[in-house]
Image: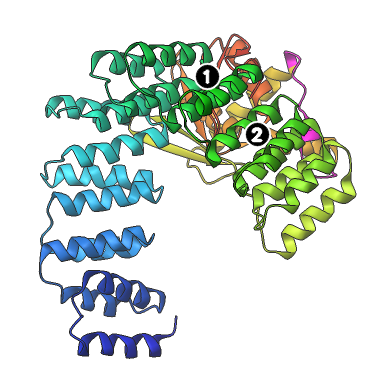
Amino acid sequence: MDLKTATKTHSRVVVLGLATYPSLVSSLISTYARCHQPQIGLRVFSKVLDLFSRNLVVDSLMKGGQCDVAKKVFVKMPVRDVVTWNTMVGGYVKNSRFLDALNLFRRMLSCKVEPDGFTFAAVLTACARLGALCNAEWVHGLMVEKRVELNYILSAALIDMYARCGRIDVSRQVFEEFVHDHVSVWNAMITGLAIHGLVMDVTLLFSRMEVESVLPDSVTFIGILTACSHCGLVEEGREYFDMMQNRFMIQPELEHYGTMVDLLGRAGLMEEAYALIKAMPMEPDVVIWRALLSACRIHKKKELGEVAIANISRLESGDFVLLSNMYCSLKNWDSAERVRQRMKMGGIRKNRGKSWIELGDSIHTFNAANHSHAEMKSIYRVLEGLVQRAKLEGFTPLTDLVLMDVSEEEKEENLAFHSEKLALAYGVLKSSPGTKIRISKNLRICLDCHNWIKIISKILNREIIVRDRIRFHQFEGGMCSCRDYW
């Protein structure tokens, strides 16, 4: 953020005749933006005259995560082609700004710019990550209307999109109707089935791959091992892990080890999970230690949890929360308080639970105990009614999950306003009785919310589908598709 040095360096760039070199231009624009002089950056961009180079500048900004700067540059461009729009839409997707990607795609259509296969691949991914079924169906309809030819990339993207939007039946239909001779298409279907916990379907599909002479790759086995992990099939997971290496000569990567640690840890085989980590031929990454830490929290293995924490070089909020959660479950309030103090001293805030629900083409987002929604009074009224009805049916809040040494009443109140409960209350408020309610969440659903939604599905006689960070939960008649194992 040193403006003086930035302008000196800029002068050197100009003197050396490199003032229109795309990657330098994007670096200069980013630097001036950081120095709170964006207007100078835009003047630099104005010196780049050809569209090809301007598109490269936008692409470079997006790759550097400078989405807002890229947007300013995009707005200033007098001429844009489909590549310009694709760079922006795809850049938003790669930077996890999925709503921005969808909104820009709508603007692209309103500007009469014809989208191509690259556009649709990015937009399908945006719909998938949001779990936005109405938007997904609209985009797919556009593809049919414009007669976009499906290659293996688009076929895989469609399968993945419908699976992540909760319509695994449509994913199957797409898979069966179109050519699936590329391993990516099979992988999309296997992964989709895995996140729905349909492990038997995964194993049958894997058998079909062999019959149809499609060789699996490393991604295939990540999907299979994930399915085994979601359903607690330890022996089958071990078999596939061995098969991958001995039959298909695929060497396990970090992701495979991470999934195996998750599988063993969830099943309570903590020592075996730890032994696998120690036997790895490469350095275990933070994801693997977090998988072990998560299992330690579930099975209350304090010592091993502390080993996992010690091996995470850069602790984030989720790691502290898992450790604090574990201490709280053991009623070790002093240790939990020390963890919270470490967070406070390090300026680390807990990741807030966020849930969203799609109604029509609009997506409504809720944070825990949030009051910002325009209809929050009505939402709270519906939620309080549901909470009381659940208690009458015998539901008891799991106050042990609250990471605070406070009164039981305060703990109950804390649990009552989790983001998925707010989203569900809004879904009940805005939808017709009997219709499905679909909710997405950025974190793993907590046990209290899971038990509560099971009871609500029975009380309301409605199917409620929740996609959390790990998998889908299909609640119906007081039961969940995960069979309480997730």
Magenta part of the chain: 392-406
In primary-sequence order, the first of circles 2 and 1 is 2
Q: Number of marks in the image?
A: 2
10 Å crowding of disc 1: few (<14), some (14-19), many (20+): many
| Image coords of residue 94 (percent x, y) | 37, 48
Q: CA distance from mark 2 to mark 1?
A: 30 Å
Dominant secondary structure of the residues highlighted in magenta in the image = loop
Which circle marks residue 207 in the picture? none
Q: Residue at x 68, y 40 (%)?
A: 279
Amino acid at circle 2:
Val
22 sits left or right of 466 in the view: left
In magenta segment, residue 402:
yes
Report the colour scheme: rainbow
444 sits left or right of 148 in the view: right
25 sits left or right of 401 in the view: left
216 or 480, nearer to the observer: 216
Q: Which residue is mark 2?
A: 261
In magenta segment, residue 218:
no
Q: Which residue is mark 1?
A: 464
| Image coords of residue 288 (percent x, y) | 63, 42
Q: Residue at x 41, y 47 (%)?
A: 96
133 or 396, nearer to the observer: 133
175 or 100, nearer to the observer: 175
